[in-house]
Image: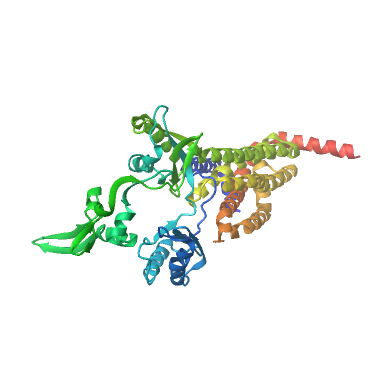
Amino acid sequence: MGIIRFAIRYPITVAVGVILVVMFGLVALTWVPIQLTPDVDRPQITVQTVWPGASPQEIEREIIEEQEDQLKSLAGLIKMESLSSESFGSIVLDFSVGTDIDAATLRVSNRLEQVPSYPADANKPVIFNVDSNASAMAWFIITALPGNDIDIQTLQDFLEDEVRPQIERVPGVAQSNVLGGRKRQMQVIVDPDRMAVRRLTMRQVATALASENKDYSAGSFDEGKRRYVVRTTGDYKTPQEIEDVIITTIDGTPVFVRDIGRVELGYRTAGGLVRHKGRMALAMNALRESGTNILDVMSGVRATIADLNANTLASRGLHMELVYDQTEYIDSALGLVKSNIVLGGGLAILVLILFLRSWSGTFTVAISIPIAVVATFLVMAIMGRTINVISLAGLAFAVGMVVDNCIVVLENIFRHREMGKPRFEAALDGSVEVWGAVLASTLTTMAVFLPVIFVQEEAGQLFRDIALAISAAVFLSLLAAMTIIPTLAARILGARDEDSRGKHRTSAEAAAH
């Protein structure tokens, strides 16, 4: 076979090729993103609608059922679930694998626009394009330093304005959220007696406030070479602006908000509480961008936390503590799999020594293990995969497989040496004689795992890395068996190995007789 003859004739070329593959494999090892599990694409869209003060039954009847009627015929929709609770309703839409999530989001938005009507005081539906892999890689707890008696729940706006942007500026961080606090809001505190005297209802007050708290686009106009965009802004900026809102007119006299109550700047009712070691606290998280190396991202996050504690938070008497770090679990899981790979490789080499009974033969076969493993990382980088527990498990399974082809080729070369052939002739004849069987063995192994790569469902996406790792490692072991093994066997399997094997065989035959 041409490749075997070439490898035996030009050992320097083979050595350079091996060095290049190993070098690029090690470089790829630093490029390939590291994470706990492979990314699984589950196209999912969530629609959330808030109707303050509404019961779950009202949410379902007035909002959810109307939205479901419009959304149920979406193309590619395979599952739709809804939830109705106090003042809140949501619909989760699952689409088939391969659906363009951006296009699906646009279709959902268009369908929601076709809902006939919403309750007057219900908020507009909010659409979330959910990333199924966007789980928090880190959680932080913000507490007040000893001696600082501030109500920490009132600091949510500060964290969202000053702290969250710094976390989100870390390369690789997709999003950060603040939980457990209360946001500032304008509060209108009405006097029921004053309202009763003027025969006003809460709906009238709410309608008047909402009608004035709006921004409107007034179009645009051209003047010379310039075009001006006109917009009227009516957002409330101060409590005084709200107090001056006219609710209605009674006998020609306007009724202002200040006539039926007062307006003050306060805080919303907390939707939840965060406690840390018995003290009130706020929580933040950080979500990783898809395709980034979580180890590098978390390194930047830790540096940012240290800077925040030394400057921004220290000036407010606050402290941020990292309470959950996903990289700790990743390091532990990957470390366990790596140790299994090393242990498996060591046991494979031990078995080779016991059965080959040749140090040079053992070295010839054993060298294929690290070469195939490192080269597999290069294949994974080219295929755009990540280093995770699944892919490393595939490598662990493949460690024992990669030596099979090499052992078959080496044993046949030994057989030709025992027939009295010179080393180069034995290496060529022994390799050519079994290359067909070795190729068939490799292809049958790959035929078992390769179909998994083309499965698009969640199971296929999850186990794609293990199939790719095993298939790549086994195929690379075939190349090693056809190039590296004959090259080394033609040069380091000398008479000593032959005599040693002959002595062992003679001793075994004598013991049998």
Colouring scheme, one of rainbow, by chain, secondary structure, one colour: rainbow
Name above or below for residue 93 compared with residue 389: below
Relative to the observer, which residue lies in front, 40 or 110?
110
Name above or below for residue 3 compared with residue 303: below
Within the image, what quadrant is residue 217 found in?
bottom left
Residue 193: image location, x then y, percent: 32, 55
Q: Residue at x 64, y 58 (%)?
A: 448
Relative to the observer, which residue lies in front, 343 or 443?
343
Q: Outermost residue, top direction?
A: 147
Q: Is residue 62 left or right of residue 445?
A: left
Residue 165: image location, x then y, percent: 35, 42
Within the image, what quadrant is residue 504 found in?
top right
Q: What is the number of callouts on the image?
A: 0
Q: Residue at x 38, y 72 (%)?
A: 116
Let me know if residue 500 appears in the view: yes
Residue 148: image location, x then y, percent: 39, 29
Relative to the observer, which residue lies in front, 208 or 152?
208
Within the image, what quadrant is residue 310 found in?
top left
Q: Is residue 155 left or right of residue 421?
A: left
Q: Residue at x 45, y 58 (%)?
A: 88
Q: Outermost residue, right direction?
A: 513
Q: In the rendered view of the protein, which quadrant contains the C terminus?
A: top right
Q: Is residue 16 left or right of residue 318?
A: right
Name above or below for residue 102 compared with residue 152: below
Q: Is residue 6 left or right of residue 505?
A: left
Residue 427: image location, x then y, percent: 66, 45
Relative to the observer, which residue lies in front, 62 or 444?
62
Let me know if residue 367 appears in the view: no
